[in-house]
DNA sequence: ATCCCCGCTTGATCTGCATCAAAGCCATAA
DNA sequence: TTATGGCTTTGATGCAGATCAAGCGGGGAT
């Protein structure tokens, strides 16, 4: 959910080339300026919990830098990641004050927060904001549905390939890299265990399947985290996606 | 996503006791009345496809009666249900004209449709509508995340128990039955295969686990579709849910 | 009545991933 | 330098659920 700094919500800055609008100066104007008093920043260290499931959350926020995850946990400790927040993504829901999942910083994290009440008032006063938020929520719902297909029906190998493709895509769109030429290179922002929680697997299976994809030449690795994708088409094939549509969109 | 007749979107009718607002006379007033010219009904027979993945969808709609499903399909035919629409639920997204999944009527289905363009204009003119839609979309996102936990981490038995609990809950809220006393009784609106597509299982496993729950006294069956739940707490335990909160809310 | 078809159940077997276990790698601290 | 601890890889084994296969039951058509 790309929101960060609500300014982009009111429709301005359409030509801003950076997905993470937080760093775009042109964005920091207009309505938002009036909101300085309700906006503040918070930072968290890697591993810190931002908020626990069931807690009251009196703010909404968007990620400026770093990565956060949303996870659900069962009593016996089984964990499933249900959201992955990259820079510019949004958390929280106007109108409801508790969250149903844990939010955790997996890297050092900087968030831009808005106190909930004033934010809600602003939404009423500035319809564009609400519309943009709706659009983002619908995008997130689409992503969740794709994720459900992955969890319910894909094999372990397909799951890994899908995750690599998703990260490659999101990373590429942050970096504005030239599409369709040259290898795609990125660092995995997740541990094997976090990948497992994302994919509904165990960490051992993740490790084995990553090794298998490397052995089969689908990806190359430098160290444990640095990934090189020479043939994106091949990776998408392995992912079982019926279209490569949407890449770099 | 409870919407049906956009009237409820503008916030009136808070005391309407019926989740399926389509049948509530008090709702059919106000802004909506002005919209008669953009609103129409469509019916489908059981098994008919409402719209194919990738097709252009020039309307948004809500279910009046019957049941529809959203499913994603892989090239080789693996299918995963990603949405289950009961009366009052909403489909379609203002702002995007294609859908990424198949919408199918699993029973005879009546939908209340709004042409997309005018609906979008109305959203701009009537902020309440957009706000209500946002709220509903966020609810749906929460449901999707719960579903992801089910798909990624629950056992077959837990999946079945969860699905039965979900249907019992939704059915009960439609029927306004007296909470917490007496057995809960309902008809399964899905075939074993559809249940399997919902849960990320095969139909054989669904059949076996339903039999097992019956054998163990968690549920009783009359015929193949009619379910009796004598002890809801027991069912929720089997579902692995860490809270029964939310039931009948 | 009989047949057929479709949805469902049940059984036998197979397999992909989980589980249990051990050891390797690398960074940081002592 | 060696020790320590977190992350990762790899191996051996087990099991939940998939797959393959057969048969049941009830409703609709003829």
Image (cartoon, coloured by chain):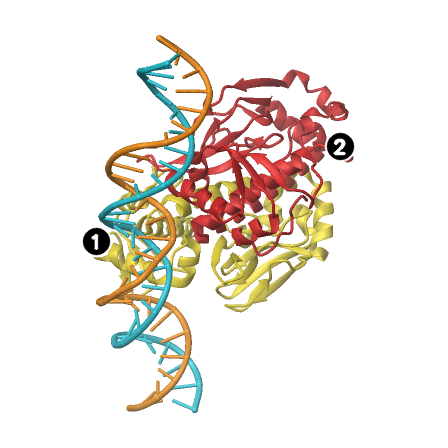
Chain colours: A red, B yellow, C orange, D cyan
**Subunit under mark 1:** B
Q: Is residue B144 above or below residue A52?
A: below
In the visual, does B7 lie left or right of B174?
Answer: right
User: Quick one: B137 or A249, which is closer to the camera?
Assistant: A249
Q: Position of residue D24 (x, y in %)?
A: 25, 75
Q: Are labels 1 and 2 assigned to the same chain?
A: no
Asked whether disc 1 touches disc 2, contact meaning CB atoms under 8 Å apart, the reply is no
In the visual, does A216 lie left or right of B31?
Answer: left
Q: Check the picture and name the quadrant holding the C terminus of chain A.
A: top right
Q: Residue at x 41, y 43 (%)?
A: A208
Q: CA distance from mark 1 to mark 2?
A: 60 Å
User: Quick one: B184 or A206, which is closer to the camera?
Assistant: A206
Q: Quadrant of residue C15?
A: bottom left
Q: Check the picture and name the quadrant holding the N terminus of chain A.
A: top right
Residue B15 visible in the shown view = no
Q: Residue at x 59, y 27 (%)?
A: A63
Residue denoted by label 2: A16
């Amino acid at each position: 959910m790309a929101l960060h700094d609500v300014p982009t919500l009111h429709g301005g800055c359409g030509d801003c080339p950076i997905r993470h609008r937080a760093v775009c100066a042109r964005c920091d104007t207009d309505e938002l300026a009036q909101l300085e008093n309700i906006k503040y920043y918070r930072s968290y260290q890697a591993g810190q919990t931002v908020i626990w499931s069931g807690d009251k959350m009196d703010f909404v926020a968007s990620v400026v830098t770093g990565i956060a995850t949303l996870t659900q946990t069962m009593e016996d400790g089984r964990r499933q990641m249900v959201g992955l927040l990259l820079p510019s993504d949004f958390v929280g829901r106007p109108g409801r004050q508790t969250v149903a999942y844990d939010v955790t910083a997996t890297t050092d994290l900087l968030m831009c927060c808005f106190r909930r009440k004033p934010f809600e008032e602003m939404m009423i006063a500035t319809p564009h904001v609400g519309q943009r938020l709706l659009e983002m929520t619908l995008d997130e719902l689409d992503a969740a549905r794709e994720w459900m297909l992955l969890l319910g029906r894909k094999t372990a190998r397909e799951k890994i390939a899908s995750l690599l493709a998703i990260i490659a895509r999101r990373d590429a769109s942050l970096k504005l890299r030239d599409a369709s030429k040259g290898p795609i290179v990125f660092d995995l922002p997740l541990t094997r265990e976090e990948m497992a929680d994302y994919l509904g697997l165990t960490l051992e299976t993740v490790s084995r399947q990553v090794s298998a994809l490397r052995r089969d030449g689908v990806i190359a690795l430098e160290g444990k985290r640095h990934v090189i994708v020479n043939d994106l088409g091949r990776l998408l094939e392995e992912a079982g996606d019926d279209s490569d549509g949407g890449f770099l969109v």
